[in-house]
Amino acid sequence: MRTKDFKSDFYLILDKFKNKENFSFLRFSDGEMYILQNKGIVLSGNQVKVDGVVDTHGPGHPQYDSKLFDPNHHSQFRDYLVASFLHSQPNYFKGISCQCCVGKDNFDWQLENLGGDDDNLTWANLLVNSNYSLFMEEFYPEIKNRGAYVICNEAADLSHLDWVKGIFTVKSDIFDNFATYTSQLKSFIEENNIENEVFLFSASSLSNISQYVLAQSHPNNTYIDIGTGLSYEFKIPSKRGYLDQYYSNQPVTGYCIWN
């Protein structure tokens, strides 16, 4: 059994990548957790609202980083997200929100709904926070060397990145069009007989659903949710503490704990 150490789990994923072992790494961060809990979410330029409670103290979100999840209108999206959360298969790693970031009650809620802890569970923050420097300095060079397909917001600019093999762009309204995006990606893999390739997802909660579908239908590829980790590379910088620290040459903090 793994020790569930933040840094050790990072190297577990990195070693699989270096060895070209196909796997999926999904991130159920706080936003995905709230959707799983069927709470409404509004992320806009001036506020964060979860289940009707407004927090105006945090950073605003640019259009490409905003979202509006309405439980009454997006129930099908949530059903698929729940399925991706509960799904289990070899090399299907689910990163969940840790108690140091979302509190013990929310952490326990996730484990209870998953039926307990297991070796395929890890941190949603595995590639960020205090591991972000490792990601940029050790993981990203491996990605550039191997090349990858990227699924990201339509506002991104990847034209200067020669390691990108293909781009699939999505709009900000992923909750309404998730099935179309996932179907297009699945068809591309099928029609081109894609195997042993890397797909990087930076498409909010759509990433989870697409990876869930593709891990079952085409497990012979690697699917990684990189979140906002390469947002500066994609020229759509996100407002995240770890990004601010890294790009201002400060030590990146936030060594996450499991329990």
Image (cartoon, rainbow, N blue to C red):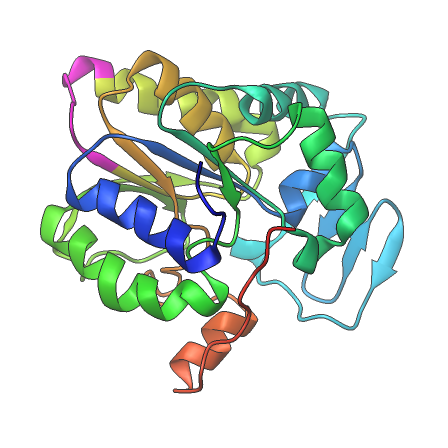
Percent x, y for residue 42?
74, 49
As drawn, 147 above or below 180: below
Q: Nearer the viewer, residue 179 or 83?
A: 83
As drawn, 73 above or below 19: above
Q: Is residue 170 left or right of residue 79?
A: left
Percent x, y for residue 159?
20, 57
- The structure residue drawn at horizontal position 49% and vertical position 78%, both measured from the top left corner, is 244
Q: Is residue 137 visible?
A: yes
Where's the N terminus, which quadrant? Answer: top left
Instruction: Write down the region rendered in magenta.
Output: 190-198
- Looking at the rendering, which quadrant does residue 186 occupy? top left
- The structure residue drawn at horizontal position 76% and vertical position 54%, both measured from the top left corner, is 103
Percent x, y for residue 218?
28, 17
Q: Is residue 236 visible?
A: no
**Secondary structure, magenta segment, majority class:** loop
- The structure residue drawn at horizontal position 50% and vertical position 32%, both measured from the top left corner, is 208
| 194 magenta-colored | yes
Residue at the right extreme? 52
Residue at the bottom extreme? 249
Percent x, y for residue 181?
43, 27
As drawn, 257 above or below 194: below
- The structure residue drawn at horizontal position 89% and vertical position 48%, both measured from the top left corner, is 52
